[in-house]
Image (spheres, rainbow, N blue to C red):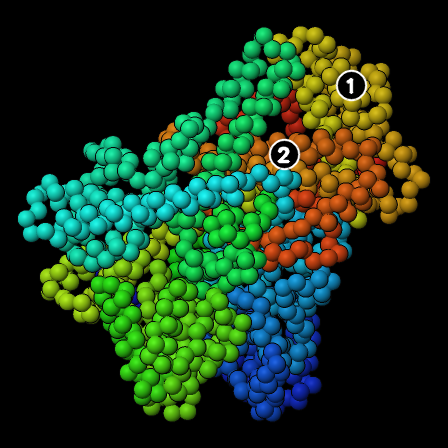
Amino acid sequence: MLTNILKAIFGTKSQRDLKKMLPLVRRINQLEEEYRKLSDEQLQAKTPEFKERLAKGETLDDIMCEAFAVVKNACRRLAERHTEVDVCGQMQVWDMIPFDVQLMGGIALHRGNIAEMATGEGKTLVATMPLYLNALTGKNCQLVTVNDYLALRDSTWMGTVYKFLGLTVGCLQNMQPPHVRREQYACDITYGTNSEFGFDYLRDMGMATEASQLVQRDHYYAIVDEIDSILIDEARTPLIISGPVPMSTHQFDVLQPLVGDLYNKQNLLCSRLVREARAVLSRQDVSADEREEAMMKLLQVKFGLPTHKQLLHVLEDGDIVKELEKLETRVRSDSNRGMLQEVQEGLYFAIDEKTHEADLTELGRKNLSPNDPDAFIVPDLLGTINKIDSDDSLSAAEKTEKRNAFQEEFSAKSERLHDLSQLLKAYCLFEKDVNYVVQDRKVMIVDEHTGRLMPGRRFSDGLHQALEAKEGVPIEQETQTMATITIQNYFRMYKKLAGMTGTAETEANEFHQIYKLDVIVVPTNRPCIRKDENDSIFKTKREKFTAILKDVEERHKKGQPILLGTISVEDSEILSRMLKMRNIPHNVLNAKNHQHEAEIVARAGQAGAVTVATNMAGRGTDIKLGPGVADLGGLHVIGSSRHDSRRIDRQLRGRCSRQGDPGSSKFYVSLEDNLMRLFGSDRIVKIFDRFGLEEGDELQHPWLTKSIETAQRRVEQHHFSIRKRTLDFDDVMNKQREIIYGLRKDALLSETPHDVLFGIIEQVVEMEIQKAASPAEGDKESKRDGFNIEALLAYLNLTFPLNFTEEELTEGIDGARLVDADKLTLQIVDRIEQAYVDRNAALPEDQVKYLERHTVLEAIDRLWQEHLYAMDNLRSSMSLRVYAQKDPLVEYKHEAYKIFKALMDQIYQDVAANLFRATVTRLISLEELLASMPQELIHNTLDGGAITINSADLAPGQPIMLGGMPPMGMAGGAEAMPEEAPAEQDDVQITFHRTVPKVGRNDDCPCGSGKKYKKCCGRE
């Protein structure tokens, strides 16, 4: 209440920000009037003038008004000359000059905010002003769109302005080769999709083996178009580059008939239970015990197949719904432990729709494996191996043989259980033509928010293979992660980020928490006169669809255009069939027909047009009204269901009434819709019962619409908590990725890879000296006042073939004691370096540099891939820590730190071990082998599934090194993650403590001589 009063007095933050922009808008318009007197050449000369002023110390804010005025004046000149632009094969006459509200939007974008602007307000044009301004810095500025078509369209269309003012513009498209992509990034402004930018980053940082293979320049400034779609909807699917596993071990083809048979049995069982319950409930003389038994059967069906058609029909009765909810609450309560298991034991498996889980019951396990009661018991891995190792009756060879046999058995059983779980999910939780479609004998994912097909994307963790087995199409090979990053963490790398959309206000809290972006609601240029009608609520989907068809038929007769939005492909096909039966001509836009969706949606405002589309189809394309349509009431938007998110519903409503046009919108809801079934209030059901509404009757009231929006808020909060938790986990991985990618980039771009290589050698030698100085307790032999020089010599001679002797190691050793570890380190490293230089003296300098760079990269890339696999397994196992009353996130941080520290130590050791073993021929052969391996670009989904963007092989000519990242030292690695350090560290005894910062052997000498430390004071 207090918040509302303060807003009424002082206005919202967005309103206050807009008020501060008004003087700037007036200044821009004044300057633009002055620029009208300039010739084209004089106006175009402003661009180099601005660049020169920035170079002399002025800031972007200093020249913002002038730059915006230049862009506005350029638009005016193009419009006055009726300039024709070829936009994706269609000639467009330039007729756009920025309005004042568009100038406000541009200011908001330049300042790193999100500009919420209604559909049709010209967001595409708004972006030209801040992009032009920021591109004057000489750094690459990027505009991120939702699909390749919009990227190509907008870069061509808006490129007219940029090119007129002397800037270059590029566009990323799927399957462009590396040299073309490099040219696009070399432009001042680059358009592309989030996945194209993200995967280029992963290729650059994780897989490029030469500086010439890098395509991206920097991450300076980006404007994200439809930012809610990309940073919220798409953020739930991290980007992954995957490669094939060495050997496929899945059992989906073997297990599919068993799970399919089990699903059919459950379906028949549920049908029988519903029939029996209905027979009892339809009687007048039913006793209380009989009624409770019937309700228990319905509850069984709800646990077994919650979307069973007969069950949904029974649940049209409000009294039964209320009684069933009370029974379910009682069954699930802690005071009735064991009751839930009793209800579920008659089923083959149990489903929880809210958590998206499906589990076998004891009956299901017996049905799948009647002759092997232990088939679903995973053996104790550590206990069994320990038992084998402690069996003194076995020889070493027999122990090895038994261990290998047991591990093979353990792996096979674990794989079987995992495959069964994924097949069960595929059958119970993923519906054909809703979550995916089958085309050309391939399973293609349907984007739940846009309704578009996502060709090439794949669910991960075996779920996609389970769907392929379910549908009887070829099962493709398994993959494993090679490089990965979440959308959130990719865009958080930019120095300045901004975005624009028609719907961001409802997600303002998430934008601020995760991206530190504020939402500024920019008013429309003309008042919006759209009429939003109250929702119509029905008992069943059948009644709802009938009412929708009646509404469409009435409006179509008078010629009013209609956009009918659906939330799934299945609904759009049902409505399409019903329209055909009534002989109503229409266009269908869904995941199966989206090639020309922009053109079809653009014509949806013509008189008599009826367009059936998934809610987000054709987003980014304005719907302009045809002649005479305004007199008929404008475009009428119908929502066939409420979406889980209010934001998606607002996007659908926003398709009409652009630029002051008339229009109307209305949503139809049934109690069978997933939103109402899972998160809706029983208040609406009570109203149906209280008024005794008959079939076909509807409810309408503003309070009911608010009640539905409350249910949507619950779902939004649920999804936000999942995204936030996903980000919390990925932040751990992101710190590791930043360290590795940063160091890898240094190695790629270094003109002296020799220094990078021997920086690592120095770290390794120093660590081994510390180990020798702090031997394990109880080791009384071979010590010289606590310094185990024999152990150090053993390591050096094993790793470096230089035959070190005790007599040589004199620096930093006083008699029997180690007094200066740094001096001893420098002596050893100098000896190694001299031998290395002598060994490669006959090789050309470019080959030596190649050898040094790739000796480092090969070790890092190989071990990083193994690390990613270990981290995947670690994360998937974290949920089990809950049973030990531990926070999975805290446990994940502790374990991840240990694994990462071990990774870096192993990288150092591998680089050192390969120093004298690596040859140019060997490295080139390895690169050619890895480059020939197919790659896939994948997204991980929230439910452990995944999605693969662009499953085509990586562009030819780009060598692949598995996993991919660069050298890392202790200082840049483990110490860079102090907050991840667990309370229980590995036992590392540090003997020597520096009182001054360490000087690296390749650093400038602190004495001021200008020489490197190793050539100056480091030799003293």
Q: Residues within 10 Å of mark 1 (few under 14, many from 20)?
A: some
* Quarter-of-image position of residue 185: bottom right
Give the number of marks: 2
Residue placed most toward the observer, 1016 or 297? 297
Give the SS element for disc 1: helix
- Precedes in sequence: disc 1 or disc 2: 1
Residue positioned 64% across, 25% down in the render: 993
Q: Which residue is mark 1?
A: 793
Residue placed most toward the observer, 1012 or 875? 875
Name the side, left or right, on which 666 lies relative to 295: right
Name the side, left or right, on which 590 lies relative to 860: left
Amino acid at dot 2 = Leu
Residue 747 placement (x, y as % from top left) = 73, 45
Query: Distance between the Cα atoms at labels 1 and 2?
Result: 24 Å
Q: Which residue is mark 2?
A: 903
As displayed, is residue 709 above or below residue 98? Answer: above
Give the SS element for disc 2: helix
